[in-house]
Image (tube, helix red, strand yellow):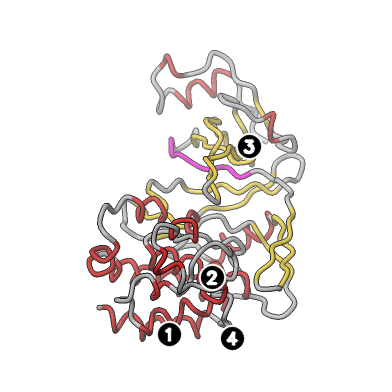
Amino acid sequence: MADFTQDDLRDLLSKWLTPERIPKRFRIITDTTDFYRVDYDDVAIFKDRPYLIRNVEKEGRFGIDEQPKFWVKRAIDMITGETKIIKLVFWERFTAKVGGISFECFRSPKKEARILDIVRGHPNFMHGFSVEDSAGNLIRIIDYIKGKTLSDLVFSIKKSHEEYFYEDIPLLLKSYIELIDAVRFLHKHGEKHGDIRRDHILKDTNTGEYKWIDFDFNYYHRENKFGYDLFGLGNILIFITGKGDLTIQELTNRPDILNSIDENDMNIVFHNRVANLKKIYPYIPDELNYILMHFSNGAEVFYESTDELLSDMEKAINKIC
C-alpha cells in the first residue's frame, strides 16, 4: 500500500479545494468495518487510492423524511477531483410479502459488485467498481449522478391529472419502457435488481437518461426468481399513471368514486393505494389499465417476465402516443 504523508494528502487536495477548505490534519482509514467511525474529513484509502470523506448520503422511503444512510458516504477522489459515492458494507435483512408470497430480502455487496461489472457502459444504470479495504470488506465506488429522482420529477409537474396524462405521460412511459428493458438486460444475465422503486431511478441532468441505482439488495425466491422485481416495476407504473400514489384516504371527499372501489381494485403490495386507476380517471386506455390490474388484489395472473410486461406496454403506448 502506498504510504501517504499528511503533506502528500494536502498537496493532492490543493488541486481541488481552496486552502481554507483543506483540513489541517487527516485521519487515515483503511478498515471500514465500523462504518460509523468513517467521518467527515477522514481520508479512506483503498488500493492506494485516497478519498476525502464528505457527507453521509440520505434517502427517504414510504413517505418518511430522508434518513441518513451511515454506510453510504459522499467523497472526493483525491487523484481526479471527481465526486464519488462510497458504499461500505452493511448487513441488513427483512421479509417482504406480496400477494401472499414472502420474499426474504438481504443486502449483498457481492451481488452489487457483480452487477456493476455487468452494466459497465449501459446508459440506464449507475456505474462504478468494487474494491476491498484492508479488512476484506467489499467497497463499491460509484460515479456520482447529478439529477433528480423519478418521484421528485413527477411531483414537480404542477398540472391537473388530465393535462399531465395527455402532455407528460407519453414521454414518461417511453422512458419507463427503456427502464424495463434495462431490467430485462439484468435478468438475461441471471441477475435481479432487488430493490426496484421510484426513488431508485435518477434522471441524469447531463445526459437526460434515466438510470437505475442501488443494486445491493438480493432476495431468496421460490416460484419466480424475478417476481419481486416485477412487482416493483408495477408499483412504479401505477405511480407514473396516477401522478403519485392515490390512496383511499384521499378519496374520502369523493364518495361517488370511493363507493365504487372495492378490495380487488387496490394495490397488491400497498393495500391503501388504488391500482384500478381507470375508475378515477376514465380517460386511461383499457390497454394501460389492463397492465395496472396485474398488480391489484384482484389479479388472477401475474407477469412472469419483463418480456411479457414489455409486450403489453408496447400495446399501451401505441394507444397513448
Rendered location of residue 4, percent (x, y): 61, 26
Q: Amino acid at mark 4?
A: Val
> Mark 1: which amino acid?
Asp
From the image, tell me which residue sits under label 1: 312
Q: Nearer the viewer, mark 3 or mark 1?
A: 1
Asked whether the residues under the numbered discs 3 and 1 touch, taking CB atoms below 8 Å apart as contact, a structural biologist would say no
Mark on residue 301?
4
Q: Report, in whole angstroms, how far the alpha carbon at label 2 lies from the one at label 4.
A: 15 Å
Query: Which SS class for mark 2?
Result: loop
Cα distance, mark 3 to mark 2? 35 Å
What secondary structure is marked by label 4?
Answer: loop
| Number of the front mark, 3 or 2 | 2
Q: Secondary structure at mark 1?
A: helix
Label 2 vs label 1: CA separation?
21 Å
Residue 86, located in which quarter of the rendered image? top right
Pointer 4 or 3: first along the chain: 3
Crowding at mark 2 (Cα within 10 Å: few <14, some 14-19, many 20+) = many
Of callouts 2 and 4, which one flags the residue occurring earlier in the amino acid sequence? 2
* Figure check: 87 above or below 261: above
